[in-house]
Image (cartoon, helix red, strand yellow):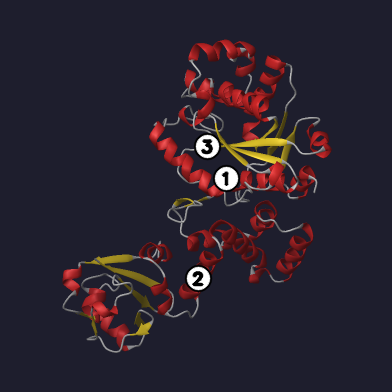
Amino acid sequence: MNFVEELRWRGILHDIMPGTEELLNKGMVAGYIGFDPTADSLHVGSLAQIMTMIHFQRAGHKPFALVGGATGMVGDPSGKSAERNLLSEDVLQLNLAGIQKQLEKFLDFNSGVNSAEMVNNYDWFKEFSFLNFIRDVGKHITVNYMMAKDSVKNRINGDTGMSFTEFTYQLVQGYDFYYLWKNKNCVLQMGGSDQWGNIVTGTELIRRKDAGEAYALTTQLIKKSDGTKFGKTEGGNIWLDPAKTSPYKFYQFWLNTSDADAKAYIRIFTLFDEETIKALEVEQDAAPHLRTLQKALATDITTRVHGEAEYEKAIKSSDFLFGNTGIEFLNELNNDEVIGIFEGVPNFTIAASEFAEGINATELLAGKTAVFTSKGEAKKMIQGGGVAINKQKIGTAEDIYQADSLINGKFLVAQKGKKNYFLIIVE
């Protein structure tokens, strides 16, 4: 497998330093990508870089995942219009542990000579004094060179300016590359296209400090076809951590991809080969309403990120909301998973003490909650057979609901018509 060609046909490759492809074709190369530890989980925006590392390792090369315990304390100005809040060491350590656990799902850390390795730049920066840094690193890179970088020019010419802390970021990242080159024989740094300036600062530091050779490769920044930011919804980031984004919501994110984006994302985010993808595209073009690409995309990514069991739950959750799966399915889920399915659905809370004696259907839906705006409206629709609790049509307006009606001892699911759901929480 040719790593660069793999990135090319998938539409991922953005820029590559001369000589890099030739080097990669000679034999195993050690390369790295840095991950920013601003949270204890990566989000789908990080998946493009994770996929790059997967392809890199599958091509026989050795990937290093660098988590920026030190650079996370500084903040990368690339693509930023304002200074980022700096994190404490305790928070950083928590974030690093979460990220490492996630990366271990994707990379093989036990494959012999090209086993993946995790490194933390805090390990080599924690004892590095300021005076030693400016003497051993700062003297090799001129201010003119640093000022020429777009990430610096854009901020200096903007309204907010740039602190000395962020100005030094490219030197800090450049030293990461130098350290890995010197100590781990790591000769290639990869990253998103916005990282090109920082990466080549590292290659320049290696050249000027030790007359060494190092290489750079960047990938496309992922954007949606409508110009909006990839990986965000109205509810915020789509995280890889199931506690932050439920597997159901994660699956739905990919399933709801537009046709235009699905054709790009199926190449970027899956491991399907070119022949398989082209066959899926033929099916999609013949019957777009079947959403063949979106289903294949959502299935593949959800399974690889969350596992087969969570994928099956996501499918059952979809069937529950949009199909004929019975209420029994919800009893297989924990409370957070139930709430995750109904994220965005109107919900109401009733005190357990109020529920203890039982509540009739009318009072439940138009008194204790606002499923209906009036009791008269509730009674009328119940009589017409258009209201259900826990997938069972309500027989009469006086039907009583008690503790034994609750899912997981906590929830009731009300339906008004076929598609209007309401979650009632008793606590």
Q: Mark 1 or 3 closer to N-term?
A: 3
> Which quadrant of the structure image shows residue 406?
bottom left
Residue drawn at point x = 57 percent, y = 48 percent: 104
**Contact, mark 1 vs mark 2 (Cβ under 8 Å):** no
- Asked whether residue 235 is in view, the answer is yes
In the picture, the disc for residue 36 is 3
Question: Which mark is on residue 388?
Answer: none
Q: Which mark is residue 46?
A: 1
Q: Residue at x 68, y 53 (%)?
A: 264
Q: Earlier in the sequence, mark 2 or mark 3?
A: 3
Given residues 95 and 269, the one toward you in this image is 95
Helix, strand or loop at label 1? It is helix
Mark-to-mark CA distance, 1 and 3: 9 Å
**Above or below 245: residue 330:** below
Q: Amino acid at mark 1?
A: Ser
Q: Could you tell me which residue is drawn at 34 percent across and 88 percent down?
A: 384
Q: Which mark is residue 318?
A: 2
Between 58 and 149, the one lying in front of the other is 58
> Which of the two residues, 5 or 234, is positioned nearer the viewer here?
5
Quadrant where the C terminus is found in the figure: bottom left
Query: How far apart, in angstroms, are the residues tagged by discs 1 and 2?
Result: 26 Å
Q: Secondary structure at mark 2?
A: helix
Q: Position of residue 167 (x, y in %)?
A: 53, 20
Q: Residue at x 73, y 50 (%)?
A: 10
- Residue type at tag 2: Ser
Dot placed on the residue nearer the N-terminal end, 1 or 2: 1
Q: Is residue 28 left or right of residue 44?
A: right
Label 3 residue SS: loop
